Amino acid sequence: MLTYKNSNFRLVLIYRPLLSTKIILTTITFFSAFATLTEDLTNCHSPLLITDSFNFHLDNSGNTDAHNFLDFLESAIMTQHVTGS
């Protein structure tokens, strides 16, 4: 919990590394864990800020993982604020 100018909010930092031979966290596993985390976090009543490096190419409309990620944010009533690279 952080306080800034008399406002409290929760700050969560997330890093999802790119897949490699050493990192076997699949996108499906990531989405499952992220869904559980956001469900737990949204049950609290203070504002939430998630800052991240999810490594999804949101600028690529053909990227299925990016599309699924944006769909998840919408279903969780969350907003992607960053645009561009």
Image (cartoon, grey):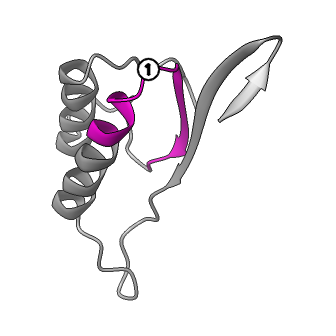
* Residue visible at 20% across and 34% down in the picture: 62
7, 74: nearer the viewer: 7
The residue furthest right is 5
Q: Quadrant of the N terminus?
A: top right
Residue for badge 1? 45
> With 70 as the anchor, is 53 left or right in this view?
right
* Residue visible at 18% across and 22% down in the picture: 75
Could one spot residue 11 in this view of the protein?
yes
10, 82: nearer the viewer: 10
Q: How many marks?
A: 1
Q: Is residue 37 above or below residue 2?
A: below
Q: Is residue 37 above or below residue 85?
A: below
Question: Residue 10 in magenta?
Answer: no
Q: Which residues are magenta?
A: 38-54
Structural crowding at the residue carrying mark 1, measured as other residues with C-alpha within 10 Å and reported as few (<14), some (14–19) or many (≥20): few
71, 56: nearer the viewer: 71
